[in-house]
Image: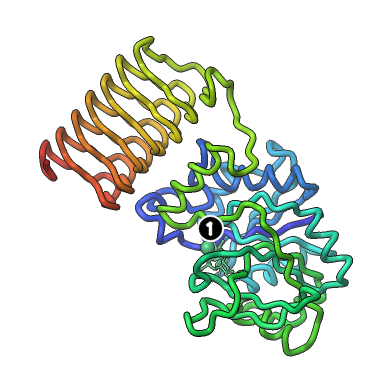
């Protein structure tokens, strides 16, 4: 079974984390998100995947290769210019021969793909859209269905007054290849504002597959932290890598942990992490490979990528650190703060309330002070 994953977006909402790392490559529990997604697809019977990228194709090829390391066949296809969601699939139509899954590349879900496929076949559907309930549909594609699950209306980013249901497009589709006859070649064309409304006109059978599977769009800073939280507390089906060294504490390989340090799970520690005297790491927290956590540091509810050095007495709470930052002594970095890559922060700064530091930012001691 084949699948196309749409990974063309720029990930602007996740900046500065996406300044140096394309959105599908940002780590989720110390593993590139796309890699985790590919393994999930493989485990659910998909053996060939086409990544529809818009830029940085070489970056994807360098990390994922031909997919053999992950146990599937992978093609990375770069569009000549942004073709939109449906145009991107049209662009790889030659590689498709039968019923195909299509995925938005920024969705974390444990949806049962085989159950969705059985539904698609049972209904005789030409195009099936997975649906999930949300509190606020205005950021998504609203989907109205009838009592037999046939789609009656699709409204992308509805206005509040147009909301008639809380069911939205969850970004997983099953598509019969004939449907692509409606997509104009070599043009920018969207599923959401183009093909779906067209299918409602032509009357081709289009069904919505409602599901209560775990679902979230990872493309926003708060949801990025929330997804980590949900994985670590076991709200989503997830297989942890590495070895479990204590109650809900996983260690990926070789770490130095001072005997006086306190680690309260759920916590994942990457390869070669060093944790010094009296440091306290409180879950849900993920610490990337080769980070050094100084003495009396306290980290809670945070995600650190690789190669960060945190000096004595600093507090990290509900924040995200990219790669290779040097954080001085006794800083308070809290409340959704996001630090890009290779920043250098002096001592005793207070960074909070969603502050974002661009890569390579340099802050002196007490520059943003208590
Ligand atoms: N290759 C390629 N080319 N990919 C693209 C392009 C393109 O021109 N444009 C967007 N994508 C990819 C993005 O990288 C992302 O993985 C996916 O298509 C959806 O684009 P987003 O920009 O993330 O859209 P959204 O989140 O605002 O809305 C979409 O997803 C919602 C669910 O998360 C829509 O499909 C909504 O209807 C849906 O509810
Ligand atoms: Mg999205």
User: With respect to residue 270, does 345 lie above or below?
Assistant: below
Point out the residue furthest to the top here. 259
Side (left or right) of 272 relative to 163: left
Visible in this render: residue 55? Answer: yes
At a point 20% along the width and 35% down the height, the residue shown is: 331
The C terminus appears in which quarter of the rendering?
top left
Mark 1 lies within 8 Å of ligand 1 (Cβ measured) = yes
Of 289 and 63, the residue lying toward us: 289
What scheme was used to colour the molecule? rainbow
Q: Which residue is mark 1?
A: 217
At a point 78% along the width and 62% down the height, the residue shown is: 100
User: With respect to residue 113, does 82 lie above or below?
Assistant: below
Q: Total of numbered circles in the picture? A: 1
Q: Position of residue 163 (x, y in %)?
A: 54, 79
Of 222 and 254, the residue lying toward us: 222
SS state under label 1: strand
At a point 22% along the width and 45% down the height, the residue shown is: 351
At a point 44% along the width and 32% down the height, the residue shown is: 283
Q: Position of residue 292 (x, y in %)?
A: 34, 24
User: Which of the 4 quarters of the picture holds residue 91?
Assistant: bottom right
Q: Position of residue 124 (x, y in %)?
A: 88, 72
User: Which of the 4 quarters of the picture holds residue 276?
Assistant: top left
User: Which of the 4 quarters of the picture holds residue 148?
Assistant: bottom right
């Amino acid at each position: 079974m084949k699948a196309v994953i749409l990974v063309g977006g720029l990930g602007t909402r996740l900046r500065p984390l996406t300044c140096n790392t394309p959105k599908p490559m940002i780590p989720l529990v110390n593993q590139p998100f796309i890699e985790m997604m590919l393994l999930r697809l493989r485990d659910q019977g998909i053996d060939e995947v086409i990544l529809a990228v818009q830029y940085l194709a070489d970056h994807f090829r360098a990390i994922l290769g031909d997919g053999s390391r992950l146990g599937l066949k992978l093609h990375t296809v770069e569009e000549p210019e942004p073709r939109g969601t449906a145009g991107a699939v049209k662009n790889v139509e030659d590689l498709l021969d039968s019923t195909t899954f299509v995925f938005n590349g920024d969705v974390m879900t444990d949806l049962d793909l085989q159950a969705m496929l059985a539904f698609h076949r049972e209904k005789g559907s030409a195009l099936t859209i997975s649906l999930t309930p949300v509190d606020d549909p205005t950021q998504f594609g609203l989907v109205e269905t009838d009592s037999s699950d046939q789609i009656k209306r699709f409204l992308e980013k509805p206005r509040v007054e147009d909301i008639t249901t809380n069911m939205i497009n969850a970004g997983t589709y099953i598509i019969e290849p004939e449907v692509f006859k409606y997509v104009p070649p070599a043009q920018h064309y969207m599923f959401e504002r183009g093909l779906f409304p067209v299918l409602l006109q032509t009357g081709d059978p289009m069904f919505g597959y409602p599901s209560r599977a775990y679902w979230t769009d990872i493309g926003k800073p708060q949801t990025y932290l929330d997804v980590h939280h949900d994985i670590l507390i076991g709200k989503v089906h997830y297989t942890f890598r590495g070895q479990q060294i204590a109650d809900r504490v996983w260690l990926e390989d070789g770490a130095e942990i001072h005997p006086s340090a306190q680690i309260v799970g759920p916590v994942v520690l990457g390869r070669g992490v060093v944790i010094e005297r009296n440091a306290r790491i409180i879950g849900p927290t993920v610490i990337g490979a080769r980070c050094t956590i100084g003495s009396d540091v306290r980290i809670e509810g945070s995600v650190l990528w690789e190669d960060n050095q945190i000096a004595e007495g600093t507090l990290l709470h509900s924040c995200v650190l990219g790669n290779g930052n040097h954080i001085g002594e006794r800083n308070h970095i809290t409340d959704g703060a996001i630090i890009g890559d290779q920043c250098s922060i002096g001592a005793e700064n207070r960074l909070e309330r969603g502050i974002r530091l661009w890569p390579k930012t340099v802050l002196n001691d007490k520059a943003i002070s208590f």
